[in-house]
C-alpha cells in the first residue's frame, strides 16, 4: 500500500531555483558559454522539481473531488456528528444503573 502524504510533505519551494537561474543569467555577460550551460541545467532542475510537486499533489487525499463534492462531504460529516452528539446526550441521561459495591 502506498504511503499517504500530506500538504506539508509537498515541496513547492521554487524561489531559490528561480533566483539561481536569474543570477546565472546576469553572469552570462562574463562567461557566455559556461553560463548558458549552467542556466540550462538549473532550468532542468526546476522542471524536475515542478514535476515532482505535481506528482505529489496528485497523491494528496481528496484531490480527486471537486469543491462541490468536498462541501457535500463536509455537510454529511457535520450532520453525522450532530446526530451522534444527540444520541450521546440521549443515552447519557437514560437510566443509570447502580452497581453494587462489594
Image (cartoon, helix red, strand yellow):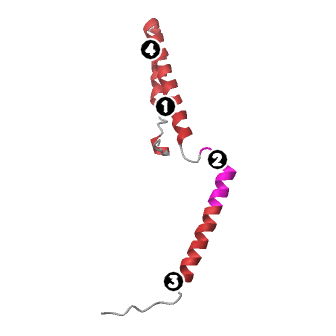
Label 3, secondary structure: give it: helix
**Viewer-closest of 50 and 64:** 64
- Label 4: how many Cα within 10 Å (few below 14, some 14–19, many 20+): some
- Check residue 65 in the rendering and tell me which mark sits there, or answer none: 2
**Viewer-closest of 95 and 58:** 95
Q: How far apart are marks 2 and 4 (CA)?
A: 41 Å
**Viewer-closest of 14 and 58:** 58
Q: Distance between the residues labelled 4 and 1?
A: 17 Å
Q: How far apart are marks 1 and 2 (CA)?
A: 26 Å
Label 2, secondary structure: give it: loop
| Cβ atoms under marks 3 and 1 closer than 8 Å | no
- Label 1: how many Cα within 10 Å (few below 14, some 14–19, many 20+): few
Q: Left or right of 76: which side holds 24?
A: left
Q: Earlier in the sequence, mark 1 or mark 2?
A: 1
- Label 2: how many Cα within 10 Å (few below 14, some 14–19, many 20+): few
Circle 4 residue? 38
Q: How far apart are marks 3 and 1 (CA)?
A: 54 Å
Marks counted in the figure total: 4
Q: Which residue ends up furthest to the right in the rendered image?
A: 68
Task: Look at discs 1 and 2 and give the one toward the viewer.
Answer: 2
Q: Tell me if residue 55 comes above or below residue 92 in the rendering.
A: above
- Label 3: how many Cα within 10 Å (few below 14, some 14–19, many 20+): few
Circle 3 residue? 92
Q: Give the range drawn in magenta.
A: 63-75
Label 4, secondary structure: give it: helix
Q: Which of marks 2 and 4 is nearer the N terminus?
A: 4
Q: Which residue is drawn at 62% across and 44% down?
A: 64
Q: Left or right of 102: which side holds 49?
A: right
Task: Look at discs 3 and 1 and give the one toward the viewer.
Answer: 3
Q: How far apart are marks 4 and 3 (CA)?
A: 70 Å
Circle 1 residue? 14
Q: Residue at x 55, y 34 (%)?
A: 54
Amino acid at each position: 500500500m502506498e504511503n499517504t502524504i500530506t500538504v506539508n510533505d509537498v515541496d513547492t519551494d521554487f524561489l531559490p531555483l528561480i533566483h539561481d537561474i536569474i543570477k546565472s543569467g546576469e553572469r552570462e555577460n562574463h562567461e557566455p558559454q559556461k553560463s548558458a550551460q549552467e542556466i540550462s541545467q538549473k532550468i532542468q532542475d526546476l522542471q524536475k522539481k515542478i514535476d515532482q510537486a505535481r506528482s505529489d499533489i496528485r497523491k494528496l487525499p481528496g484531490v480527486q473531488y471537486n469543491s462541490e463534492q468536498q462541501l457535500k462531504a463536509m455537510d454529511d460529516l457535520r450532520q453525522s456528528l450532530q446526530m451522534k452528539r444527540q444520541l450521546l446526550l440521549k443515552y447519557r441521561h437514560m437510566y443509570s444503573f447502580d452497581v453494587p459495591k462489594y
